[in-house]
Image (cartoon, helix red, strand yellow):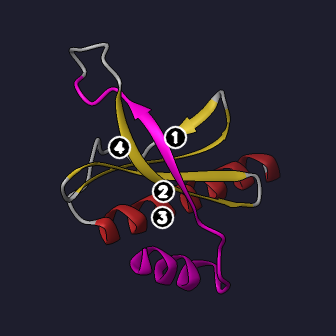
Amino acid sequence: MQVVRDTLRERYKTNKEIHLADTELRLNPDSTTLSSCPAIYWEHGDCHFVVCKVGKQRYFCQFFYGRNEQFGTGRDEYDDILECLATLLRVQADHELSINKKNEG
């Protein structure tokens, strides 16, 4: 949790409220079985972020704006929480920039 707090403080220059959550994910793409996974969740503006622990030193992440606007990082999972967070924040920032450029043009 400290790595998460420190990373978010560095990114947003303020403390973010982080929530613990339980998620259900399909860990095996060939199965319809859902697995319960612990997660952390936070918001920034109208964007929501979630990082799920899917195994020992294994993490899945995504950000979303609503039910129909969900985005990943292009990777199914990470074995390092810091790399997971940094990539998630970078991909979301790039997404915001591309949306702003489209709206300006």
Image coordinates for residue 78, horizontal then vertical, percent = 25, 55
Quarter of the image where the N terminus is located? bottom left
Whether tag 1 and tag 2 are in contact, CB under 8 A, the answer is yes
* Residue 37 position within the rendered picture, expressed as x and y whole percent measured from the top left: 37, 42
Q: Amino acid at mark 3?
A: Arg
Secondary element at image label 4: loop
Task: Name the amino acid, label 4.
Answer: Gly
Q: Where does label 2 land, which residue?
A: 91
Residue placed most toward the observer, 77 or 16: 16
Give me the C-alpha separation between circle 3 and circle 2: 4 Å
Q: Which residues are magenta?
A: 1-28
Q: Residue under circle 4?
A: 74
Residue assigned mark 3: 90
How far apart marks 1 and 2 lie (CA) works out to 9 Å
- Residue that appears at 47% across and 79% down: 7
For the point 65% across and 27% down, the residue is 68
Label 3 sits on a secondary structure element that is helix
* C-alpha span from label 2 to label 4: 9 Å
Disc 1 target residue = 71
* Residue lying furthest right: 104
State how far apart marks 4 and 3 are (Cα). Answer: 12 Å
